[in-house]
Image: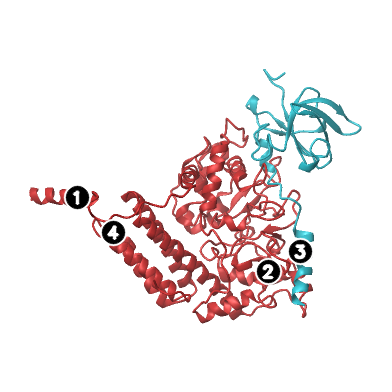
Chain colours: A red, B cyan
Amino acid sequence: MRHLVLLSVAATLLSLMPLPGCKSMPPPPREPQREQIAKGKEVFFNETFNGNGRTCGTCHPAQNNFTIDPTFIITLPANDPLFVAEFTPDLRRNFENPRLMREFGLIRENLDGFDDLENKFVMRGVPHVLGLRTSVTSPQGPRTGWSGDGAPGDGSLRSFAVGAVIQHFTRTLNRIPGVDFRLPTDAELDALEVFMLSLGRQQDLTLPLPLKGTIAKRGQAIFLDNSLGKCNLCHVNAGATADFGGGNIGNANFNTGVENLPDQPPDLTGERVPPDDGFRTPGDGTFNTPPLVEAADTGPFFHNNAIDTIEGAVAFYNGVSFNSSPAGQALARVDPNGVGIRLDATQIVAVAAFLRVINALENIRVGIELLEGSLRARSPEEAKELRERAIRETDDSIGVLEGGGLHPESLAHLREARRLTKKAIHSLFFGLKHTRKAIGEQRKARALLVEIPVS
Amino acid sequence: MLRVLLGVLGIGILLWGGTPYAHGQKATEMFIPLGQSPGVSHRVTVMGRIEAVSAPARTITVAASAGTWTAEVTDRTRIWLDRSKLRLPSQEGAFADLQKERLVEIKYEDDGRRGRGPAEWIKVEEPGRGLQ
């Protein structure tokens, strides 16, 4: 028995050692910003800035697509720093609304000033931070946060963390730098910016995609039809930029009437939620445009988490609130029939199906990238982390397709990819083999969604 | 035809929604001490001691390392008292807080008119021990 144990230990050690003469994986390509990204990642997930215990990752956790929602929130322990208002006496009043946080994933923000904490605040959802490279820039300056004015200083993504630390990381409502928190250093801001820009897509899609699914394909056609869905005007290529025919104007702000929805979920609780006036102080009622590729697995939707499902979010544009809003009225004015957006139920579902499929394609792209990265990992820990992230992406792709009843044949491959990835994580000797097979399954799944040859 | 209509629509939307430069969320700006505002301090702001105050003209003149600068204080100008060195919270200020000899940081509305135009915000260091 003892011999068996020794042999097993020896075999394990041997498997971890590079064998001379064997072809090993090439080293990871030297990316100029790799170290800066790693530093930014460290700050993003671990740096509390001497505040209340929160980090950027508290509200933008990697395991939940860098956002939070009630389903994720309920999995957190009671002492998670997200709930700091529930257990820190100095933050019990006027810092968060624990009920609205837990029920709707809403965060309290004092966007119009800190002079009347009791009455001047808004409740907002947490936007994900994926695809920022394609979604923040506008000719008028960078647009961050839900209303496009989410950063102090120069308003840039780099400066965003400073505002976040002051608003969300403070130990008391006095918000004194050096007492309640420390401000990020220039080096930390540089690293955070590089890290955030590295997340998710680095470029927009080019639509139309050669989709295979009948409903998703129809949804794409409606999306791109400037006389029917009109979606592509403000979400060019399902991203976050606008083009009304005179060229792309970058990320833009619109008043789409979300604040006029008759049944705002937080209002139904009886909790006091002042209206959100959007961009600037006083606000002009506008909010900026989020990218749509990542939408289906990052709900709830809109700045106030008003709608839970992607179908509901598409249907919003068919309703009275949008069509009577400044944006809806502008669309109606240039429509030959005076219509803003009018879609029927099947068309709403088709657009949502399209958004689900492009989200799944992005999940698959990232999943493959992570799995390929795990083949080149410099340590078993790094490989494990990359594979675990790949599993989360796969879960998302399964979730968004399953939620719309889409592509069951592709789902089978995604489930198999997930199983193989999990096996790779737990395998001592066949991690690479299982990973390669998982990549193959991801590619097969993708090939069933879009016309791309299986390689 | 549709392209023309969409162009008109675009201009229309830009006119009401395409606001001027997105300066950033000002609310948290008040808690950032003088000289530490990211991306603007030591780049586009002016820091120095107030040399003169004209209440009728609503202007202040500041002696900075690069010369003398004037700023107009309008109804839009935000004034904040930076009390961080006293380990006290920042406060909303008023024109009356802009007194001679006080250290201030000025962010102009238009960076191109730095040194003569209206101020977007002015941070005033609250005098305390060692600061007077």
**Residue wearing tag 1:** A14
Give the farthest residue toward the front: A21
Amino acid type, callout 4: Gly
Does the rendering let one see residue B22?
yes
Q: Which of the two residues, A349 or B50, is positioned nearer the viewer here?
A: B50
Q: Distance between the residues labelled 4 and 3?
A: 54 Å
The spot of residue B60 in percent (x, y) is 83, 30
User: Of discs 4 and 3, which sits in the foreground?
Assistant: 4
Q: Which mark is residue A233?
A: 2
Q: Helix, strand, or loop for circle 3?
A: helix
Amino acid type, callout 3: Ile
User: Of discs 1 and 3, which sits in the foreground?
Assistant: 1
On the same chain, marks 2 and 3? The answer is no
Q: To which chain does the residue with label 2 belong?
A: A
**Residue wearing tag 3:** B13
Q: Quadrant of the N terminus of chain B?
A: bottom right
Q: Distance between the residues labelled 1 and 2?
A: 59 Å
On the same chain, marks 4 and 3? The answer is no
The spot of residue A103 in percent (x, y) is 54, 57
User: Of discs 1 and 2, which sits in the foreground?
Assistant: 1
Does the rendering let one see residue A184?
no
